[in-house]
Image (cartoon, coloured by chain):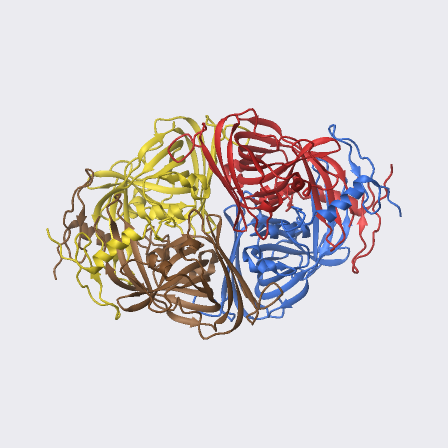
Chain colours: A yellow, B brown, C blue, D red
Amino acid sequence: MKVIRGRMIGSHNGEAPVRRQDRSQPNGSFQSGYTARMSALQGFLPPLTPKGTSSLVPPMPWYYSGTLLTVEYRTDPANVRALLPEDIDLAPEDPGAVALIWADWQSCSEGGLELLDPVRSQYLEAFVVVRCSYQGTLYSRCVAIWVTTDFAIARGWFQGYPKKLGSIHVTRIFNHGKATPRLEAGAKLGASLSAYDHRLASAVVTLREPSDSNGFVNGHRMLHNRFMPSITQGAGLSFDQLVTMGSTDVDLGTPWRGDAELTLADSPWDELASILPVHEMIAGYYRELGATFAGGDLLVDRSQPV
Amino acid sequence: MKVIRGRMIGSHNGEAPVRRQDRSQPNGSFQSGYTARMSALQGFLPPLTPKGTSSLVPPMPWYYSGTLLTVEYRTDPANVRALLPEDIDLAPEDPGAVALIWADWQSCSEGGLELLDPVRSQYLEAFVVVRCSYQGTLYSRCVAIWVTTDFAIARGWFQGYPKKLGSIHVTRIFNHGKATPRLEAGAKLGASLSAYDHRLASAVVTLREPSDSNGFVNGHRMLHNRFMPSITQGAGLSFDQLVTMGSTDVDLGTPWRGDAELTLADSPWDELASILPVHEMIAGYYRELGATFAGGDLLVDRSQPV
Amino acid sequence: MKVIRGRMIGSHNGEAPVRRQDRSQPNGSFQSGYTARMSALQGFLPPLTPKGTSSLVPPMPWYYSGTLLTVEYRTDPANVRALLPEDIDLAPEDPGAVALIWADWQSCSEGGLELLDPVRSQYLEAFVVVRCSYQGTLYSRCVAIWVTTDFAIARGWFQGYPKKLGSIHVTRIFNHGKATPRLEAGAKLGASLSAYDHRLASAVVTLREPSDSNGFVNGHRMLHNRFMPSITQGAGLSFDQLVTMGSTDVDLGTPWRGDAELTLADSPWDELASILPVHEMIAGYYRELGATFAGGDLLVDRSQPV
Amino acid sequence: MKVIRGRMIGSHNGEAPVRRQDRSQPNGSFQSGYTARMSALQGFLPPLTPKGTSSLVPPMPWYYSGTLLTVEYRTDPANVRALLPEDIDLAPEDPGAVALIWADWQSCSEGGLELLDPVRSQYLEAFVVVRCSYQGTLYSRCVAIWVTTDFAIARGWFQGYPKKLGSIHVTRIFNHGKATPRLEAGAKLGASLSAYDHRLASAVVTLREPSDSNGFVNGHRMLHNRFMPSITQGAGLSFDQLVTMGSTDVDLGTPWRGDAELTLADSPWDELASILPVHEMIAGYYRELGATFAGGDLLVDRSQPV
C-alpha cells in the first residue's frame, strides 16, 4: 500500500506551506537534511546537542529500584468509565477498583552515571491506576500522576503517563533505631501528595502479613494515550497514539498486605476526590522492587498533520 | 489529493496490529468512538477528565506579564551551527550572537483564575536564544531553557521549547527602600540559573540608559522542532514537526541597555558553557512587558506512524 | 551594684562543673580566651569562621524593599489572650483584631552584595500579628510566621519572630500585559500559605481606593520573647528575654484599602484556624514599602544559667 | 553564694528600664506572671500556643533512623585551629582530620506521629566535623552543617549545630533492581551538597569491606557553642553557652569502609573549600544506624543580660 506524502496541506497566515514528508524514502532535500541532522544532533528528548549530554532523558532502557506503597479501593464504576476514552471499556470484573500508589524511586540509564550524582537519580511519584478493556484485552491505565522531578515528567509524557509535579512523601522502613516501622505485622506507613500547595491525598497503611500479591489493579500492561495538540489553535491533535507497555526484568521483594486509610481532596487545579471518590477500601500493600523499562508497542496512530 | 490511511502497518510483539486512522473522515468504529471521547474528556494537555479542571495547561490564549533581563554575547558561529538541524542555516549577519534571557513571569489563561492562587501563576525562566535562517526567512530559536514550574514545562513542550526544571533568580526593581536598584543609570541586577544543584549561569547587568530595543537576538518569530520518539525503542520519531510562532498583544515598557558580566558553567547534565562559550559581550538589557500567546503555524510535519 | 558571677553552678553527669562567667571584667583564662576568640572568629550568627563569610546572617543593619498584602479581621479576644504570656495584656481597644500579612521581600545588608546573587536576597513571608499591652504601652506582637529561606528564619529567631518554613505566594502587580491586576479599584490579589504540604491560608483582596493607612494591627513597635531551653532536659530556659523593636528609614508607598476573603485551616502541625478563627472581616490592604532594621531594646532578661 | 539579680541595667532609648530577674525565687509580679505563662503557653521551641501543637520542635527525646555516608580526610591543622574558639585546643593526635558526613534521616518524637505524615519526619543533612580538646577532654565539634527542613534547623540551633538550609542528596542502597548499588565490595555511592544554588561538595565512596568503625572524627561527645547576639546592635552576646552532648540508645549496623573522592567548592556565601581544603584522603564509610537524643550538659555560661 503506497502512501503519498510530503504533500502541501495548505498555507498558514502567510507562512510557507506545510510539507508532509515521508522519511521512509528519500524524497528531496528536507528528507536528507533531516536525516543528517539526526546523526549530528544527539539526545532522546529535548534539548538536542552535538554530544547529547543535555537531553532531559537519556535513551532506554531505564532502570528502577525502589518501593511501592499501594492503597486499593472501590469507587462507583461510572466514575472510572467517565475517565476512559469511549473506545476503551471498563474491566469486566470489579470495574470500580482503583489503586493509588506511592513509589519511592532511584533510577538510572545504561552505565548508571545518575547514581553517582543522586539528585539526577532519585524521585517520588504518586499515581492513580484503574483497569480497562480494549479489544478484548485487560489493561491497567494511569489516569493521574504526580512526580518530583523533570526527568520523571519527561519519561512519563513519552509513555503516556499524564504527569504533573507534586510534593510527595512516604514513610521509609529502616533497619535500626526507633524512628521507623519495621517490616512486620503492625507496621504503619504514611504517605502524602500535594500539588500547588494543596494537600490532595494522605494515607496510612498498617501492614498485617506477607501476601501473594501487591494488589491487582496495577497488574496488567498499561494502555495509554500519547497526544499533542496542533500548534494552531483549534486545529486538532498533531500527535495522537494509543500505546501499550510493561516492565521487564522485574525483581520483586515479598509483598505485605494490610489495612489502609485514605483521605482525598480536590483543589482548584486537581480533582482527585471528586473524580474517584472512595466508596470502599480494599487493602494496602508494601513491596520493594526493581524493574526495567525498554519501550512498548503502538496500537493505533491517529495523528493528524496539523 | 486523496490520502489513504487507517492502514495496517505491521504487528508488534503479538499485540494487535497498529491502525493508522484518518480522523478527517468517518471510517469505522474507532473513528467515531475517538471523536466521541474528545467531546467527553476535556483538557488541553494531560490529564483529561470530564470537566477538564485537572489539565496541566488550560487552552490558549495564555497571557504573560513580567520582566526580561537579557544578556547578549557572541560565540563562535560554528557553535551555533552545531546546535541547528542541517536544514536550518545560520543567520546571514552576526551569526554567532546569543541571548541568555531571565524572565520573571506572572501568567494566566482566559478568566485569570490562576492570578487568585498565584502558586499556579508565577514562575521564572532562563533561556538561550540564537538566530537562524529557514527557507530565506530569519527566525529566533530557543536552544536551551529552564523553568520553575510544571505548567511552564508543559507549555514549552507544546511550543517546541526544550524545557527542563531549574532554580532561577533575578533581582527585582522596587520603588521603595534600600534593598533594590531603581530603574536608573548605574542600577545593577543579578541573575542566576542552577539545575540539578549545579550553578550553570550567573550574570550581573549594569543599566546605563534607555534604549531603542531590548536586544536583537530574540526579536524574530521562533522556529522550533516538536518531536516525540516512538514508544518502540529505535523505531524513529512518532511525532516530528517544524513550527513557528510569535506573541501577540505585545505591551512593552521602555527598555534599558547597559553592560553585562556573565559566567557560564557545565555540569554532568548540562553543557551551557561548552556549547555556547562567551567570546565577546554585546550588552545587557532590562524591560517590563506583557504578551499573549495564541498559537503558531506548522511548517513541516515529518511524523511517522511508529 | 556589684554582681558576682563566674560561679560554679553544680556538676552535670560527671562533666566539668559549669562556670558562670562575667565577660564585663577580666577574670581568668576563660574570659580572655573567649574575648580573643570573638576577635578571631567572625560572624553575626552561626557558623563562625575567620572571615565571617559563612555566617547565615551578616551584621545589622538589614534593608528591606517589597510589598505587603494585609488582611485584618476580628477573632474572639479570648483567643488573642490565650496566645499572650500572662504578663502581657490585651490591647485596651479592639483587642480581638488580627492581621495576617503576606510580605514579598528583597533584602540585603550593608554593601548590598546579596542583590547581585538574588537567591540570597529574595523571600516571602506570611505572618500573624496581634496587638497587646505591656506596662501601659501598646505593642504589636507576631504570634505565628512562615518564611521561605533560612536567612529569614535566622533573622526572625534573633528578633523573637517564631519563624518556620512555608511555601508562600502572593499576586504581583505589573505594569504591562493581561496577566496582572493594576494598582486600581477592582484589582484582585490572591495569596496562599502552606506548610508541610498542608494549605493553611488562602486570601483574595479586592482593592477599592487609596487609604490613609495600611491597617492598624501591625502599626506599633513589636513586643517579642526570645528564648532557648537548656540543653539539659527539663532544666528551664537558658535564654529568656522580652524585647521590643521597630523599623527605621521607613519609605512608604500609598496604601490601598479594599475587601478581603480569607480561608484558614489547621494541619497536624499548625493551628492557624483553631487558635485565631475569623469572626468578622475588617479589610484588606496593599502597600509598597522599604524599611531598615537596626536592632531593638531589651526590656527584661530572665535567662537562667542552666 | 548569693547572686543579686532582677536589677535595673540601664534605660534604652526611652523604653522601660531592663529588669534582670532571677526566676529561681519569687521576686514580684513579673516572676509569677512569667511562671504562669509557662504553664499556659506550651511548646518546646517557638511558636508557643495553648496546646503546643504548633511548636517547630516537640520536646526531647528525639529519635533518629537512617544512614551515614562519611568521607574522612586531612587538612592542614592550622585550618582546623582557625575554626576553633581560642579556649578550645586542637586534638593531640591527627589534629587535621576532618569528616564530611551525609546523613539520610527519618526522625520523630515520643509517640511517632511524625512518621505518619512523613514530610514532617524525613530530612537529609551534610555536616563537617573536626575533633578538639577542651580542659583535657577530647571532643568532636561540628563546624558547618546544612539540612533540608526547618525542624532540623531548629533542633540544631538548640544543640549548637550551626545549621543552614541546603539541597542534599545521597545514593541509597536498595535490595532489588539495577538502579542501586548493593551493600557489597565495589558498591559506589554518590553524594552532593548545594546551598543558594551553588554546589559546595560532591563525593563518591566506593565500598571495599566491612569495617570495625565508621571513622574516628565524629566519634566523641560534641562540644558546641550556643549563642545569640543582643537585640541591641553591638551590645554583646545575650546568650552564650559552651555545651556538650551525645546520643543514646545507639543501634548500629555493620559499617563498611572504602575509598572516597571528594570535591569541595566555595560560594559567595560559604567557604567550605577554603576553610578546610583536602590535603589527603583518609577513607569513606557507610553505615545504617539509629540513635536517640535526650539532651546534654552545660559546661560554661557566659550569657550577658544585654
| Left or right relative to A300: residue D217 | right
Query: Residue B37 location, x and y as percent?
Result: 25, 52
Name the image quarter holding the C terminus of chain C: top right
Question: Residue, x 82% and y 44% (percent of image)?
Answer: C22
Query: Residue B167 location, x and y as percent?
Result: 48, 53
| Left or right relative to B50: residue C116 | right
Query: In terms of depth relative to the viewer, which is nearer, D263 or B156?
Result: D263
Query: Residue B132 location, x and y as percent?
Result: 33, 64
| Left or right relative to B30: residue B199 | right
Residue D52 falls in image quadrant? top right
Query: In terms of depth relative to the viewer, which is nearer, D254 or C11?
Result: D254
Residue A134 falls in image quadrant? top left
Query: In terms of depth relative to the viewer, which is nearer, C276 or A184?
Result: A184
Query: In terms of depth relative to the viewer, which is nearer, B172 or C27?
Result: C27
Query: Residue D115 location, x and y as percent?
Result: 52, 36
Q: How many marks?
A: 0
The answer to whether one can see residue C172 in this image is: no
Q: Residue furthest right?
A: C1
D68 relative to B178, above or below: above
The answer to whether one can see residue D221 in this image is: yes
